Amino acid sequence: MSVLVVGSIGLDTVKTQIEEHADLLGGSASYASVGASFFTDVNLVGIVGDDFPKPHMEFLGNRGIDLEGLEMVEGNTFRWSGEYHWDMNIRETRSIALNVFEHFNPTLPASYHDTEFVLLANIAPKLQSHVLDQMCRPKFIIADTMDLWINIAKDDLLALLKRVDMLILNDGEARQLTGETSLIKAGSHIRKLGPRFVAVKKGEHGCLLFGENDFFSCAAYPLEDIHDPTGAGDTFAGGLAGYLASLNHNGPITFNKLRKAVVYGSVLASFNVEAFSLERLRTLTPQDIEQRYESFKLMSKIEVLE
Ligand code: AMP
């Protein structure tokens, strides 16, 4: 089964306390679609300006991502710039230019309407809803969001939540959305707003998964060197959605399937942060993913003491 990914595609300038790089391929949908492409077919919906470098387009196409839903229009591509503190869980946005995104109103190609899995990567919740309006009964819908939309478009976000199966957001956003300090309470609270499943990301501390009567805590894969955390959350979401879509589904999406998908998402994200932009994903192989998945499984195992 395939995944439709919609979100931002942009050019990022990223500064850490060690290095700075400008005009990198970025955007939530770039990370998410490449992450998903390791597991399944991907239909990408997004917009770029006519300044978008051809090699980036070729990279996405060479990963087998379907680009019929990617519009190129006159104007400048979306741009974002961010700076990380020594504690890389903390990031400041230095600038953002919506550019061609400002008037983006995606019309899906007819061949995308019955894509079974949908990943609404981070963009305005109104646009995420607009994409859903054009879909014929997807099997599973995942949405990602960010603090900006909780601040400026909360009603749109709440309307979207009633239509999705799963929400992915980070710990600060979960607290902001619910007013709860406990993430456990926040997870249950968000489930009451609509999504049956909620994944709360905690940066280098892993992720919490909530279901109806189920809970799973997934650690983050331990890395010595993190070069650029940008897009970790989007790659996580892409890996998770791609893995889920790659399974042979006769029945519903179960919590156990989601547990495994969360681990694959975490593995993908751990590779992504090893280099700037999507550089590490360019050379990543399915064997690398399987190897890290196996070692992650071993190091997360808890023996029951007699
Ligand atoms: P993450 O590190 O997972 O928060 O995602 C970072 C990516 O999100 C960067 O590549 C940015 O281009 C993109 N991004 C930043 N701000 C926004 C926004 N307001 N809407 C959509 N994408 C954004």
Image (cartoon, grey):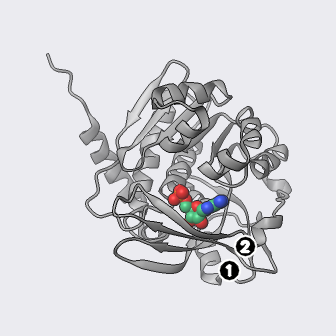
Rendered-image quadrant of the N terminus? top right
Residue at screen point 47% across, 32% down: 181
Rendered-image quadrant of the C terminus? top left
| Secondary-structure class at tag 1 | loop
From the viewer's perspective, tell me whether residue 16 is left or right of residue 210.
left
How much space separates mark 1 and mark 2, taking CA atoms?
6 Å
From the viewer's perspective, tell me whether residue 162 is left or right of residue 23.
right
Residue behind mark 2: 48
Q: Residues within 10 Å of mark 2 (few under 14, many from 20)?
A: many
Residue at screen point 84% across, 47% down: 134
**Residue 183 to residue 271: above or below:** above
What is the number of callouts on the image?
A: 2
Residue at screen point 43% across, 61% down: 229
Question: Type of residue at label 1?
Answer: Phe
Ligand 1 sits in quadrant: bottom right
Residue 247 appears in view: no
Residue at screen point 52% across, 30% down: 180
On residue 52, which mark appears? Answer: 1
Residue 49 in the image: state x and y as whole percent: 74, 77
| Secondary-structure class at tag 2 | strand
In this rendered view, identify the residue nearer to me: 24 or 176.
176
Residue 171 in the image: state x and y as whole percent: 48, 41
In the figure, residue 42 lies in which quadrant? bottom right
Residue 283 in the image: state x and y as whole percent: 42, 70
**Residue 95 to residue 52: above or below:** above
